[in-house]
Amino acid sequence: MSRYNNRIIARNEEQVYKDLLEDRGVKHIDHYTSPSLPALTTGDALQVTRIEHIWKFGDKLWRLSEQYYGDGQYWWLIAWYNQKPTESHFKIGERLIIPIPFERVLALYNSVPL
């Protein structure tokens, strides 16, 4: 199951970006809308070990994913667990939870109905 399922895709082929698109060697760029995150039940959320992290200036979800999961590509699991789809939804000083182990978190994600 891809995290991009059921997402609206906007195709950017506007003339104003013509030079940028040509520089990149592409005719268009596809943008995905911010996802609607399926919510976990309290019982499901408590099935994982929770590590607290205080969001600070310069934090990136992919870096936290790399630190705790060993791979930055799973940043979206941290975002999903915290019900904040992008880094711009976090505020400095805010508490977020890093759920571990990675395999259990991914299994939870795949079991939540969309």
Image (tube, grey):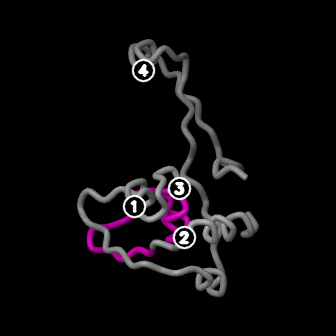
Q: Earlier in the sequence, mark 2 or mark 3?
A: 3
Q: Is residue 30 above or below residue 14?
A: below
- Tell me the quarter of the image containing the C terminus: bottom right
Foreground tag (3 vs 1): 1
Label 2 neighbour load within 10 Å: few <14, some 14-19, many 20+? many
Q: Earlier in the sequence, mark 4 or mark 2?
A: 4
Q: Position of residue 68 (x, y in %)?
A: 44, 65
Helix, strand or loop status at disc 3: helix
| Residue marked by disc 1 | 67
Q: Earlier in the sequence, mark 3 or mark 1?
A: 1
Q: Which mark is residue 17?
A: 4
Q: Is residue 83 above or below residue 3?
A: below
Query: CB under 8 Å between callouts 2 and 3?
Result: no
Q: Is residue 12 magenta?
A: no
Q: Residue at x 46, y 52 (%)?
A: 72
Label 1 neighbour load within 10 Å: few <14, some 14-19, many 20+? few
Task: Report the amino acid beneath label 1.
Answer: Gln
Q: Is residue 92 magenta?
A: yes
Helix, strand or loop status at disc 4: helix
Stretch of the chain drawn in magenta:
75-97
Helix, strand or loop status at disc 1: helix
